[in-house]
Amino acid sequence: MTFKFHKLLPVSAAVVALATMSAYASADQIVKIGHVGPLTGGSAHLGKDNENGARLAIEEINAKGLTIGGQKITLQLDGQDDGADPRQATQVAQKLVDDKVVAVIGHLNSGASIPASKIYSDAGIVQISPSATNPAYTQQGFKTTFRVVATDAQQGPALANYAGTALNVKTVAVIDDSTAYGQGLANEFEKTAKARGIKVLSHDATNDKAVDFRAILTKVKGENPDAIMFGGMDATGGPFAKQAKQLGLRAKILAGDGVCTESLANLAGAAADNVVCSQAGMALERMDGGAAFSAKYAKRFGHAIEFDAPFTYDTVYIIVDAMKRANSTDAAKILAAIPTTDYKGVIGETTFDSKGDLKHGVISLYNYKAGKKTLLDVVKM
């Protein structure tokens, strides 16, 4: 019996070793995808909406199963908060690089996306913003910067042209929040407005933390413009529109996608009905997969889409599509595959030009009726 016992020991150890090796071989490789947006501050509701869209896509892909290069992959969302602050944005960008993410979805704001972009460029990690619209973001010469929305060079003119044609605006006052986004959009609007003969009476600046706009609005009231172009986000745009109504301004409020959210009606109250705004992408109700995505999102998170969740959702699939075409989860190989993307998803077809912008941008125009965001028109650029 002793002889047999000693004889069996190495066999048992071998079985255990083989089982352990087999377990390691079959274990999924964790691949991290970063997401950055403001999860605190005035735009936290928009940042969370973006993060939710990305999270929904990752959960779906993991549930279906993903294999790249013969290896089973589990995607993990590395979500970070930049507070819509440029300095914080660079800090979390470096954290994502240190976390060894293979790609980054973000940032939400142009003012955060632009400073963070150099860090991703230096690290050779692709950055795809679902919402940054300032043209400068993709004009820095970086090979890592992409976006899945139109730019302010398209959004500003579309809004100005609509104001002049459909609203018969002859005079306008321009106000921006001094951020890369708000100032950039306001400037693009102003250039087109002047070119089509709309008289720009004034251009004033506030900031993205302001809550009291009565001094600027009182000045503008004396100018009596047909419209006021406000470059900023909904956290400031809502109170701005409300205070304009309280002061009795007759001017229509024009704004870009930062203001054009479902939350504006809560932030502006009845004054939301005086707002006409643009969105740098296809309207949800015009997206082929919009209804199905809305239902999935509501089931998963218990509330409706706020803003750009479909764009972050598709961006995850665009990154995974690049992994599949590269047959690799290596960040450099994913980056190399991104420029040749031709992906059809919820937001439509995504193809990039040489700078990383969409080849075919779309601008959607909205107003609010009894507090409900209502589509006016879709302009293909």
Image (cartoon, rainbow, N blue to C red):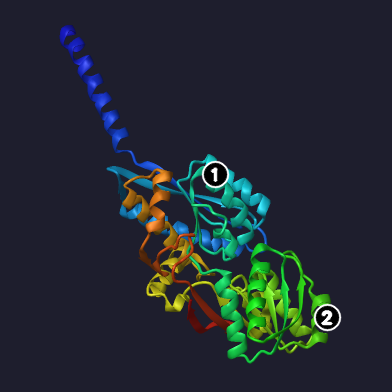
Residue 197 seen by the camera: yes
At label 1, counting other C-alpha atoms closer than 10 Å, the crowd grade (few under 14, some 14-19, many 20 or more) is: few
Q: Secondary structure at mark 1?
A: helix
Residue, far front: 195
Quadrant position of residue 164: bottom right
Question: Residue at coordinates 31% horizontally, 55% vertically from top-left?
Answer: 64
Indicate left or right for 61 with 312 as reference.
Answer: left
**In front of the other: 241 or 7:** 241
Question: Residue at coordinates 68% horizontally, 68% vertically from top-left?
Answer: 183
**In front of the other: 37 or 141:** 141
Q: Amino acid at mark 1?
A: Asp
Q: Secondary structure at mark 2?
A: helix
Quadrant position of residue 15: top left
Q: On the rendered image, what quadrant is the N terminus found in?
A: top left
Residue 109 seen by the camera: no
Q: Which mark is residue 219?
A: 2
Question: Residue at coordinates 46% horizontally, 75% vertically from top-left?
Answer: 284
**In front of the other: 174 or 56:** 174
Residue, far top: 2
Tag 1 or tag 2, which sits nearer the N-term?
Answer: 1
